[in-house]
Amino acid sequence: MDKTLENVFKCFDKDFYTVMKNIKANINEVRIRSDKPVVLYIKNKPYFILKNSDIIPLEKLGTTNNYVIVTFASLKNAFAGLCEYSIYKHQNDINNGFITVRGGHRIGICGTAVNNTNNIKSVIDITSMNIRIARQYIGCSEIFLKSINIKKGVLICGVPSTGKTTLLRDLSRTLSENYYEKVSVIDERSEISSTFNGKSIFDMGLCDVYCNYPKSKAIIQAIRTMSPNLIVCDELTGDDIESVIYTINYGVKLIATVHCDNLNNALKNPSILSLLKTRAFGEIVFLESKSFCKIDKIYNLEDIEFD
Amino acid sequence: MIKYIGLLFIFVTSVLIGFSLNERLNDKIKILKSIKSLLQQFKIEITYQMPTLTQLFSECTDYNISQLTNNISENLKNGLTSEKSIINGIECSSCVSVLSKEEKYFITDVLSKLGTSDTDGQISLLENAVERIDYYIENAIEDKRKNSKVYMTASIYIGLVIIIVLL
């Protein structure tokens, strides 16, 4: 288990940390609900953990009482620890339902919201956490680069846990180091590079990384000051339209990701359709939903008419 | 001869006790001012840089309370929770021994609340704490003004009385 992941589990109580440390499998996600058995996802399949660090498939629920359970109090303390006892530092992310910890691991949270005239002011009493484990797979973008034309701009689509961010990470590294492109990475949530104190945990090659910047502002700043050929960003939405149009005006190509599973749904989604209509992307790539970093389909957007 | 040396020793000890009590009054004012300055520094850093709690305490450069801030930051780095780090840090720091029970309790309470709310909440907490510390500083200055001469004078007189009695 890598050090950043160990530090995540160290925030929980000692028993839980010991159990997690002894698990040898390659975990994608850990779902923790207060006072309920902890569920692991390995290759996108769910398993329970037992107190002796054995894992059993979900179908075997009820065959034993030896599950690992995290109490509400332990979850609350762990959350404070994961925020490095500095809630103010993570408040914006908390209000958006997640925090990103060192190592680029994104932790989705849910609990009780404190509202202020339709806005979430804060979240208290955390009852569930979903720890999505980030990894770097050096070379996972090689097949991708052979299949697409980066020079036209690419929109990468996939459902959660199909490897979009992992692919972006390796694409940034490969394009900057091996293809000598000037790449600016807009890392709004510090998931792509996992930068802390000016150092990124993942190998980002020769990229310029904008860490924690709001996406739209960072895209415009990058174009004005770092003269990139390519801008890489994660989870683009319809709110970023203006900055996407800005990239077209300056001849900078975009590689971005969105949540979507197929072309029909993409064309029906107003947010994605508005991005496609800008013609900033020459190709749209869909990743296989049951695999990791594997291409399912590629469409040439120049052949598609938008209503 | 030995008797006179002993009497001199008693006199000097009495004066030194008075002097050290006087110094404690000075030290208390110094420590309270340093803590006030620390909280003001925290307010600026939280507003503009949003460092983690560990970074906040590690980057404190005030010599008067360096033992306190170093203890707390070491405890945090060693994996203790923020509350335990602060309580343990205050208990193990001799620099805060000059503070009264109420002052120590107040400072422990304020430092334990660091990192538990959003930026606005933290700034509000720190502003209120600085106001309260100002009140403690005023009390400490008044204390010094009233008692400083008393301690020095009393220590000299007590020393002399003991010498006279023993002579």
Image: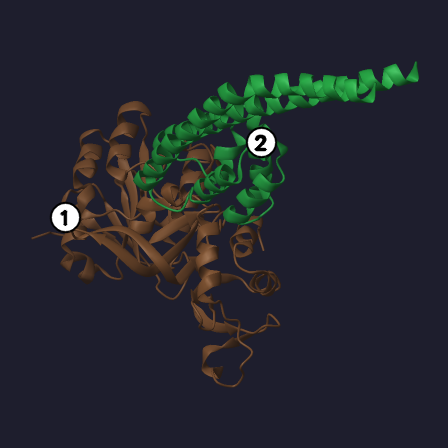
Chain colours: A brown, B green
Mark 2 crowd level (few <14, some 14–19, many ≥20, 10 Å Cα) = some
Task: Give x and y (percent) for residue A152.
Answer: 26, 40
Q: Nearer the viewer, residue A121 or A54?
A: A121
Task: Give x and y (percent) for residue A251.
Answer: 23, 31
Can residue A251 be seen here? yes
Left or right: A50 as drawn, with respect to A219: right
Which residue is disc 1 drawn over?
A274
Identity, as a three-letter code, of the amino acid under mark 2: Val
- In which image quadrant can residue B161 be found? top right
Indicate whether A162 appears above or below B24.
Answer: below
Give the CA distance from mark 2 to mark 1.
Answer: 66 Å
Q: Which mark is residue B98?
A: 2
Indicate whether B16 appears above or below A121.
Answer: above
Task: Give x and y (percent) for residue A262.
Answer: 24, 61
Q: Nearer the viewer, residue A23 or B70?
A: B70
Q: Which mark is residue A67?
A: none
Disc 1 sits on a residue from what chain? A
Left or right: A230 as drawn, with respect to B18: left
Indicate whether B143 appears above or below A84.
Answer: above
Q: Nearer the viewer, residue A170 or A115?
A: A115
Q: Nearer the viewer, residue A305 or A71?
A: A71
Whether tag 2 and tag 1 are in contact, CB under 8 A, the answer is no
Can residue A29 be seen here? no
> Residue at the right extreme?
B1
Identity, as a three-letter code, of the amino acid under mark 1: Ser
